């Protein structure tokens, strides 16, 4: 008995109906042979761009970098017909915000909301500086992430997990990316992951981790102290991340996460408003879908897992508090 998960996959041309049928048939057969309760997929298939019901839907993707995927609805219908279920457990974010890095720096700044652009300049005037982090910074960065977790009420894993992830990807390199439409910038050699640290008078006050893959940059982890927040270090961090990714030849900066429901009731609303200010485009995707290889066991699992997750989250938060002496 097991659970199967294909994060951000399967990777294929989802608009190819014959290929899609073959892959889904194989997945369903494999899940049954493995005795799995279910197999979860999380295809990177766009349903649309912009916020539903808002004015920006009509203006989505003016530069054509992010396009509405007309096949998204067909894929969803196909999954439903085959007995796949939209998952109640969305491990990855369904929606995200993408920034077009083929634009010039002036154009990128112009696309930001006025207040965001002002805060970037304010951080520079207030003496905030940004530097790439090193392996030696990782213990400090975990502690900063743990402090942020406790303050903002989200659960994180133990330090060994993050140290393994960060060190593994910081040791690997993406190599020189092929030069795409990035103006006068030349591609540079970067690790697959790098931390960027904002400092005030040499003291770390905020940081983010940026991952690079296949011409895209991804913002995955963010952390900050309560001190010096008025100097807007997070705004400058994101701007420097955009500039650095652009210089590396990346064409898209993925801010990794937007609400499921675009109103103040969503727990991500505050974070989304910050990301929205950076001038990106909302992309809404298909999300995670489950194929129950065993209908009975799947029903039992989905009924019991919310309680189990609540217990695990409570224990995780307690462990994090202990790790920082809170």
Image (cartoon, helix red, strand yellow):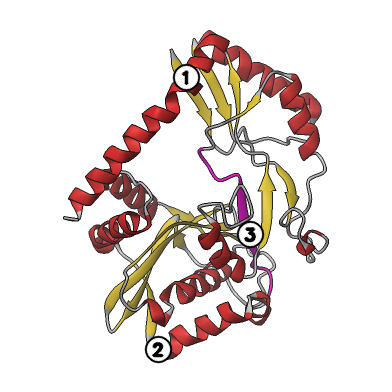
Is 92 one of the magenta-colored residues? yes
How many residues crowd around disc 2 within 10 Å: few (fewer than 14), some, or many (20 or more)? some
User: As displayed, is residue 169 above or below residue 200?
Assistant: above
One can see residue 176 in this view = no
For the N terminus, the quadrant is top left
* Mark number, residue 301: 1
- Front-most of 10 and 156? 156
Q: Please report whichever mark, 3 or 2, sits nearer to the chain's N-terminal start.
A: 3
Please give the name of the residue rendered at 29% of the width and 55% of the height, measured from the top-left corner.
146
Of marks 2 and 1, the one in the foreground: 1
User: As displayed, is residue 315 above or below residue 130?
Assistant: above
User: As displayed, is residue 246 above or below residue 80?
Assistant: below
Callout 2: SS: loop
Where residue 51 appears, as percent x and y from the top left, is 71, 56
For the C terminus, the quadrant is bottom left
Specify whether 5 is left or right of 74. Answer: left
Tell me the magenta residue range.
Answer: 91-103
Residue closest to the far front = 265
Q: Can you identify the residue that label 3 sits on?
A: 98
* Mark number, residue 126: 2
* Mark number, residue 215: none
Q: Please report whichever mark, 2 or 1, sits nearer to the chain's N-terminal start.
A: 2
Where residue 218 appears, as percent x and y from the top left, is 52, 56
- What distance separates the C-alpha of mark 3 from that of mark 2? 28 Å
How many residues crowd around disc 1 within 10 Å: few (fewer than 14), some, or many (20 or more)? few
- Front-most of 308 and 188? 308
- What distance separates the C-alpha of mark 2 from that of mark 1? 52 Å
Where residue 101 appears, as percent x and y from the top left, is 64, 67
Residue closest to the far left = 325
Where residue 303 appears, as percent x and y from the top left, is 48, 21
Specify whether 67 is left or right of 137. Answer: right
User: As displayed, is residue 220 above or below residue 91?
Assistant: below
């Amino acid at each position: 008995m097991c659970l199967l998960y294909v994060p951000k996959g399967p990777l294929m041309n989802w608009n190819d109906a014959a290929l899609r049928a073959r892959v889904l048939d194989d997945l369903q057969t494999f899940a049954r042979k493995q005795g799995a309760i279910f197999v979860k997929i999380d295809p990177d298939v766009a349903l649309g761009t912009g916020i539903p019901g808002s004015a920006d839907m009509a203006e989505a993707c003016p530069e054509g970098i992010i396009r509405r995927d007309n096949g998204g609805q067909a894929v969803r219908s196909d999954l439903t017909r085959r007995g796949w279920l939209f998952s109640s457990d969305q491990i990855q974010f369904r929606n995200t915000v993408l920034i077009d890095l083929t634009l010039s720096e002036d154009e990128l700044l112009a696309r930001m909301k006025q207040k965001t652009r002002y805060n970037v300049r304010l951080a520079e005037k207030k003496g905030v500086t940004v530097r790439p982090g090193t392996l030696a910074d990782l213990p400090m960065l975990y502690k900063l992430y743990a402090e942020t977790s406790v303050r903002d009420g989200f659960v994180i894993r133990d330090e060994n997990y993050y140290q393994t992830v960060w060190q593994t990807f910081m040791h690997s390199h993406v190599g020189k990316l092929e030069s795409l439409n990035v103006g006068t910038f030349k591609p540079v050699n970067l690790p697959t992951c790098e931390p960027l640290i904002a400092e005030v008078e040499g003291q770390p006050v905020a940081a983010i981790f940026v991952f690079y893959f296949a011409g895209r940059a991804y913002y995955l982890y963010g952390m900050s102290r309560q001190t010096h927040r008025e100097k807007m270090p997070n705004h400058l961090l994101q701007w420097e991340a955009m500039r650095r990714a652009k210089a590396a030849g990346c064409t898209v900066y993925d801010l990794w996460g937007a609400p499921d429901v675009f109103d103040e009731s969503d727990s991500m609303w505050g974070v989304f408003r910050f990301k929205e200010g950076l001038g990106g485009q909302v992309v809404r995707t298909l999300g995670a879908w489950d194929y129950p290889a065993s209908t009975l066991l799947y029903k039992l699992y989905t009924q019991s897992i919310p309680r189990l997750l609540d217990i695990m989250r409570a224990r995780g938060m307690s462990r994090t508090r202990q790790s920082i002496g809170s």
